[in-house]
Amino acid sequence: MTLAAASTPPSSNAKKIAILGGGISALTTAFELTSQPNWQDKFDITVYQLGWRLGGKCATARGPNMRIEEHGIHGFLGSYYNALPLMSRAYEALGRAPGQPLATFDDAFKPASFVLMWEFIDGKMTQWPFTAPTNALRPCDPASLAKLQSVDHWIASAAQVLDGLFDQHEATHGPQGLMAKVEWAAGRTVLRVALAAVQRAEGDLSSIESAAWRALDAVWDWMHNSAEKLAAGDTELRRLLIVAEYLLAIIRGCIKDQVATRGFDPLDAENFSDWLQRHGASMRVTSSPMALNTVNLSYQYPKGDTARTALMGAGCYLHWTLRSFAYMGAFAWLFEAGTGETVIAPLYQALVTRGVKFEFFQKVESLVLSADKSSVAAVNIGVQATLTNPTQPYQPLISVKGLPAWPGQPQFDQLVQGDALRNSAVDLESYWNGWQPVAQRQLLAGRDFDQLVFAISIGAVPYLCTELLAARPAWQTMVAKVTTVQTQTMQVWLKRTTPELGWTTPFKNPNDAVVGATYINPLDGQVDFTHLLKWEDWPTDGMPRALWYFSGAMADYEAPPPFTDTQYPARAHARVKAQCVQYLQANIGPLLPLATTNAISPPGDPMGLDFGLLQGIDEATAGDGVHRFKQQFWRANIDPTESYVTSPPGSTAARLKAWGSGFSNLVLAGDWIYTGLNVGSVEGAVMGGRLASHAVSGYPALSAIVGYPVAAV
């Protein structure tokens, strides 16, 4: 798939911007810089990326039968106030013709409000289906976004969601018996008064009336007295009260700690669970799946070890959680195709059309400081491969059913070293691949760049920025405190539909699917992404009927070895395979009860997957039993650039700002810099990219970066 270069080249006087890295933050930086009028007169932008594809932790490949193969589970929350509008703008800039696959934002992103949570009750895992109320806000509507600019609104939105959940419960269940109805009606009146007071005080929560406090206290008393009695033996009401206690603790705590005026940062020295309990949440609530959703979604486990207690700064936790209940339209927006096709390829194509240059196969090896240590003088790059036609840019995309997609390997016919790379099966994205650069190049300040944007993940900083670390103690503090964890993922293609495998819970909204983050560790995340099968290319007689993803943190059992240990990726790959097989053998029963051996071919294991359900790439060689897993997909995300950025207590103060590198020509971008959100995520990466663009050009204004505390400048 060939993309034509832009018709308007940059001005000869344009400032040269070199962006290192090709993940979400790098692409966002380039998109914002090129969203300004006459940007070619101001900037000459080049993105330098190792390997053959873009996306970073969101990179997607196509495997056998054009299977979509990802780094993990990806989707946008409805509270991605920066990422969702960015993609809306990207699709507008792309201008695909009507009828083309994923022609518009509405074609590519679908609202969904279902979350599957899990409780451990009576010695077994029990499903807790949860559907968040929808609202009329739209990600593509600036008026909707304007409503979401303040912390006060987020707190008021949490109150509104809670009120809606009580309404849902009342409509479907309602209390039985006269006394129960009287007690319920009394409590609902108090609840409405309290929540209405919070919503009325939006914009001035710091001086909320004492009457509202009395109402909140009355709700608290009702929940822990009358409502608890009503909930005896009523699972649905008990769960509603857990949600109520959780959200009310957050609302009360945010008001008490004056978050609306003081911000979230002062709370980050405290762990999230301690903060919740300090504001009245019981241990039942702080250990509930409702409270753990946030830490599981963002892998907040020390060294990736899910056998340890999660650690997350209370401010980061509250910022993320409050926003997640102040969503646009729906709780989540799911991708209609893979992340690479839905998010990365459209951004790349729009940027190429605008005139941004991309140089692939450029592995950054080190940044070199000037003699006085005040700026970056050079960037050393190892060239991984060269083009057979150096006069034309590398064309990375392929077409799958008319949809631009990223292949699972380089386009070998475009590379001088194509045959050698193909024959040796080198993974050019791995730091442990043993592949030697075919050339060395040096980007020089003043010649190749005037401004450098470092948009590579913080996990690579100790390897690439040794001179910067030595020159600035703030960099050392950041690397020590802003930690990362390795993650793992698997995808399984199945011969039966999800309902045929035992899923019976009905959905309330047309785009809802099974999405969860509180199942059994270490692969506590699970989603049903069967809708992606239409973009794959299976033979008619071997077409899967369901597609499930699982992901989670991966404990750091050993420190990453030297990059000369080229067997390390294979060991990690084998380790994840063993964990995935064991996981499927022990944990499928509660999730898909008709997928077990006992259900398919009784008598048998009531908990473990019947591996005969796995759809093989080639049934003739797929084998029997657990042997069939070898034709599924699993991945160990172990490279420094793939590690997930966490938010432990005390880490926020260590994050550098986009413009705070300490070096005059170096701007920082990523979800690891200070974004105000300070949580590893696509939203954080987009905020980091927007902040980097602001640092370079003053655009966008800080007030337009939703969630960034302008006072923090």
Image (cartoon, grey):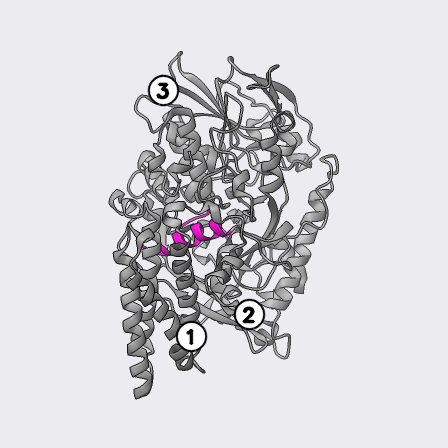
Question: Residue 497: in sight, yes or no?
Answer: no
Residue for point 57% across, 65% down:
613
Tell me if mark 2 has few (under 14), some (14-19) or many (20+) residues whose alpha carbon lies within 10 angstroms of its own: many
Position in image of residue 638 (x %, y %): 64, 44
| Res 368 → quadrant | top right
Position in image of residue 563 (x %, y %): 71, 35
| Residue 176 forms part of the magenta stretch | no
Q: Nearer the viewer, mark 3 or mark 1?
A: 1
User: Dividing the image into 4 quarters, which one contains the N terminus?
Assistant: top left
| Amino acid carrying mark 2 in the image | Ala
Tell me if mark 1 has few (under 14), some (14-19) or many (20+) residues whose alpha carbon lies within 10 angstroms of its own: few
| Amino acid carrying mark 3 in the image | Gln
Residue for point 69% across, 27% down:
436
Residue position marked by numbered label 1 in the rendering: 224
Depth order, front residue of 682/703: 703
Residue position marked by numbered label 3 in the rendering: 40
Residue position marked by numbered label 2 in the rendering: 595
Depth order, front residue of 540/625: 625
* Mark 3 / mark 2, whichever is N-terminal: 3
**Secondary structure under the numbered disc 2 in the rendered image:** helix
- Residue 461, numbered circle: none
Position in image of residue 615 (x %, y %): 56, 59
User: Dividing the image into 4 quarters, which one contains the C terminus?
Assistant: top left
**Secondary structure under the numbered disc 1 in the rendered image:** helix
Whole-number angstrom distance, CA of label 1 to CA of label 2: 40 Å
| Res 219 → quadrant | bottom left
Whole-number angstrom distance, CA of label 3 to CA of label 1: 63 Å
Bounds of the magenta span? 314-339
Residue for point 41% across, 71% down:
241
